[in-house]
Image (tube, rainbow, N blue to C red):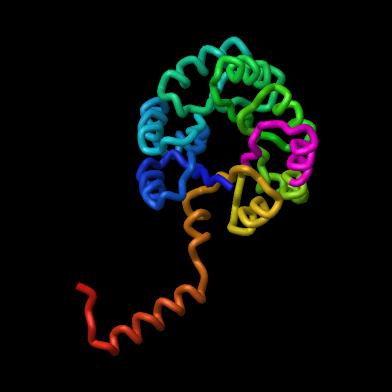
Amino acid sequence: MKFFVDTADTKEIADLAATGLLDGVTTNPSLIHKAGRDFLEVVKEICEIVPGPVSAEVVALDHETMMKEAEILRKIADNVAVKVPLTIDGLKTCKALTGDGTMVNVTLCFSANQALLAAKAGATFISPFVGRHDDVGYPGMELIADIRLIYDNYDFETEILVASVRNPIHVLEAAKIGADVMTAPPAVIRQLFNHPLTDKGIEGFLADWAKTGQKIG
């Protein structure tokens, strides 16, 4: 499963990219607002840090204006994935852009039927929001399982990008179902490293090493 980070904080992105585990980045208008920087400047900087797909979202709601915004975004770098909402105009834009060789991330997916439509429109990525589904009492991972089944039934090439990831359990369940990608905030990705037995093991090894009185180098 590919790991994307969901942030516009370039310092966090660079730090995670240094681990070699980061495959891409997702951003949205809310994350750009939080970063407090110029949108196009931030996207350009992120594309220079991460060679994988970097999702940058249009804010228009009509097809014609979406295409104008997408033209600006895809000129930033070859690894920009234009992010569009799962609406009729969004899917029209998706079809036009992917037909021209541009990566497209269709976002705000909340049903398997919506995911089916996005795949038929040629989406590179579909972003179902599991955390927001959980918030309203619907198991978000059931949505991922449904999409995986449908995509496998018809050999759709659209990658399932699990979004609105809130905790390591979401990551684990997405991987077990067979999602292609997950995107999570930096804090959640860092939680994946943690285990009390790892900490205890390191503590024990260091204590024993200190008793030897030796040094490496």
Q: Residue at x 61, y 16 (%)?
A: 99
* 178 sits left or right of 52 in the view: right
Tell how many labels.
0
Residue at point 49%, 66% (across, down): 194
Quarter-wise, where is residue 96 in the image? top right
Instruction: Please name the residue shown 63% across and 57% down the image.
Output: 172
- x, y percent for residue 67: 56, 14
Residue 79 coordinates in the image, percent (x, y)? 46, 29
Report the span colored magenta: 145-161
Q: Check the image and report above or below for 151 versus 68.
A: below
Direction from residue 110 to residue 195 in the image, left or right? left
**x, y percent for residue 195:** 52, 70
Image position of 5 with respect to 171: above or below: above
Give the residue at x 64% y 27%.
123
Measured as percent of width and height from the top left, residue 62 is found at: 63, 14
- Confirm whether the magenta stretch covers residue 120: no
State which quarter of the image contains the C terminus: bottom left
